[in-house]
Image (cartoon, rainbow, N blue to C red):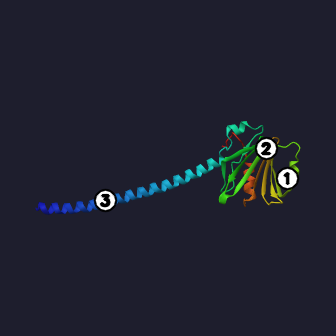
Amino acid sequence: MDVGGIWKSLSRRWSLFRVQLSRSLALRILTGFICLFVVGVIGVSLWLTFLDRTSANANPFTAQVLASVQFPLYYPTNLPTGFRMDPTSVSKPRADVVIFNLDGPGSQKIYFSEEPKPGKYNIGDFFNSLTGLKEYGVNGGTVAIGRNAQSDAEIANYVNSQVWVLANTNAPIPTDQMTTMMETLILGGQTRN
């Protein structure tokens, strides 16, 4: 019995086993990295989606702004496609008016203005001045959407017994998205579940 021959034979078999083991191990490691990469991409995508929804639904009004007005403030929770709340745009140009805007693709904007429901101004006449007027009863108030005949701006309104919320834009936003935005307004200081 040749011990040297057996040793060479075992040595060759061990080398082949190590090469196969190394390839198998490398394949497993590569598969693991690919799986981690895919899970990471999915995780980042979900995080960005959640981040976008969170910022879209975030109350833009500070406690100071809420306390400084004598009427309720509302903000949209279901924004038109591509639009985001700009909380830095919230301002009070007058004691009884709060304004802010939503930023959209291509520098498009939706401008919001909120004020107490005027006592002497006939809001119905304003609604009737809009072309393509559509009115809906929602959330203890009325949503009215149409276009300004002079500027062709789309104007969305929400009015109840205390406040008048106006949103206007020249952006090409489908009327159903503007309607949904106004129907899902919630009171500042509250969050939607």
Q: Earlier in the sequence, mark 2 or mark 3?
A: 3
Residue at the disc numbered 1:
127
Q: Is residue 186 left or right of residue 121?
A: left
Q: Earlier in the sequence, mark 1 or mark 2?
A: 2
Q: Nearer the viewer, mark 2 or mark 3?
A: 2
What is the distance, in whole Å, between disc 3 and disc 1 at their CAs? 76 Å
- Looking at the picture, which amino acid does disc 3 mark? Ser
Residue at the disc numbered 3:
22
Q: Indicate the position of residue 145 as horizontal and vertical percent values.
A: 80, 54
Residue at the disc numbered 2:
115
- Looking at the picture, which amino acid does disc 1 mark? Phe
Which residue occupies the foreground of this view, 34 or 159?
A: 159
Report the label total. 3
Could you classify mark 3 by the number of other residues whose Cα lies within 10 Å: few (under 14), some (14-19), or many (20 or more)? few
SS at mark 2 in the image? strand
Residue farthest toward the top in the current orientation of the protein: 67
What is the distance, in whole Å, between disc 2 and disc 3 at their CAs? 72 Å
Q: Nearer the viewer, mark 3 or mark 1?
A: 1
Residue drawn at the location 57% of the way across and 52% of the way down: 48
Q: Nearer the viewer, mark 1 or mark 2?
A: 2
Which residue occupies the foreground of this view, 103 or 172?
A: 103
Which of the image's four quarters has the C terminus?
top right
Q: Indicate the position of residue 97 as horizontal and vertical percent values.
A: 77, 44
Pointer 3 with pointer 1, Cβ within 8 A: no
Q: Earlier in the sequence, mark 3 or mark 1?
A: 3
Could you classify mark 2 by the number of other residues whose Cα lies within 10 Å: few (under 14), some (14-19), or many (20 or more)? many
- Looking at the picture, which amino acid does disc 2 mark? Glu
